[in-house]
Image (spheres, grey):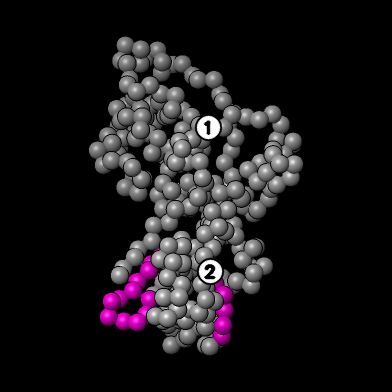
């Protein structure tokens, strides 16, 4: 509950208190028994919290947005017995599910974003971070990863980056001239490619960064992918639209304006 973006402590406590009485049976049951506003349930639905009730994100949001703003006690018992007709919604791609995980709780238990990109990264000659343990000192390599930490102590001429892919992390060292030449990428790109030289000192491994590449475009493409990647309706890969095998178009859940671009937003820890 603490990790759900936009959910207040008070509303989380109300939900937990209601759950102590008995398990929830539906989205409507959570709403009626906890007394939290619809907006709080939207935050939970966006975080995929209703999967235990057999609902994916879009199904849960559809149910939540069908609720009123306030429970009317006189009709609560009657309404509780009524069931809304089932609505078939387009499923999210595997990648979009991961994007929404990151947007709501800043991590995903489904798959790491770079797992979707690994075939393309391999095509570019980019090795996974886990390979650093097998690479000899002084060898030049290429890595890619989401930027977790940026650290630039004021008394030194070096900048430290920590990047992460689906196999682990890598620590990057940038000397002052390399940092200054590539400052916009270092400070703003959520995902970077690094070309550099491996430096080993005992069990400690760093990569001395030489050239950086902003790979934000690759990261933003994850929301359109399946895992493992296959063409999906969201790709618009052939024929400029849906795959005819999908049958008649089903309604998609209305999204807020801020949700139109399915992009992973990573909150790094930066120290200057």
Residue 146 lies within the magenta run: yes
Q: Secondary structure at mark 1?
A: loop
Q: Is residue 163 above or below residue 64?
A: below
Residue at 41%, 15% (x, y): give it. Answer: 79
The residue singled out by tag 2 in the image is: 213
Residue 265 is situated, as x and y percent measured from the top left of the image, at 44, 53
Residue 160 lies within the magenta run: no
Kindly tell me whether residue 130 is visible in this rendering: no
The residue singled out by tag 1 in the image is: 253
Q: Nearer the viewer, mark 2 or mark 1?
A: 2
Q: Is residue 84 above or below residue 221?
A: above
Residue at 49%, 63% (x, y): give it. Answer: 191
Mark 1: give few (<14), some (14-19) or many (20+) Cα within 10 Å: some
Q: Earlier in the sequence, mark 2 or mark 1?
A: 2
The quarter in which the C terminus is drawn is: bottom left
Report the front residue among 218 and 162: 218
Residue at the far front in the pictured view: 181
Report the front residue among 34 and 175: 175
Drawn side of residue 42 relative to residue 98, left or right:
left
Q: Is residue 169 above or below residue 26?
A: below
Residue at 51%, 45% (x, y): give it. Answer: 261
Q: Secondary structure at mark 2?
A: strand
Report the front residue among 196 and 84: 196
């Amino acid at each position: 509950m603490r990790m759900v973006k936009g959910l207040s402590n008070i509303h989380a406590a109300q939900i937990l208190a209601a759950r102590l009485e008995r398990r929830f049976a539906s989205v409507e049951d959570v709403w009626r028994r906890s007394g939290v506003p619809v907006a709080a349930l939207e935050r939970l639905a966006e975080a995929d919290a209703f999967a235990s009730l057999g609902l994916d994100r879009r199904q849960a949001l559809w149910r939540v947005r069908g609720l009123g703003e306030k429970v009317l006690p006189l009709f609560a018992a009657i309404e509780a017995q009524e069931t809304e007709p089932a609505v078939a919604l387009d499923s999210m791609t595997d990648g979009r599910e991961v994007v929404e995980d990151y947007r709501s709780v800043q991590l995903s238990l489904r798959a790491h974003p770079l797992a979707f990109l690994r075939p393309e990264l391999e095509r570019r000659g980019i090795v996974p971070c886990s390979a650093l343990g097998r690479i000899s000192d002084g060898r030049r390599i290429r890595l890619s990863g989401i930027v977790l930490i940026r650290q630039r102590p004021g008394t030194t001429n070096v900048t430290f980056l920590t990047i992460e892919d689906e196999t682990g992390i890598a620590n990057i060292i940038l000397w002052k001239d390399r940092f200054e030449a590539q400052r916009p990428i270092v400070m703003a790109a959520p995902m970077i490619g690094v070309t550099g030289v491996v430096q080993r000192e005992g069990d400690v491994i760093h990569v001395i960064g030489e050239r950086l590449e902003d790979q934000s475009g690759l990261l933003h493409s994850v929301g359109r992918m399946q895992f493992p990647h296959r063409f999906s309706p969201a790709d618009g890969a052939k024929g400029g639209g849906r795959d005819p095998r999908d049958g008649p178009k089903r309604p998609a859940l209305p999204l807020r304006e801020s949700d139109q671009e399915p992009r992973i937003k990573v909150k790094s820890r930066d120290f200057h």
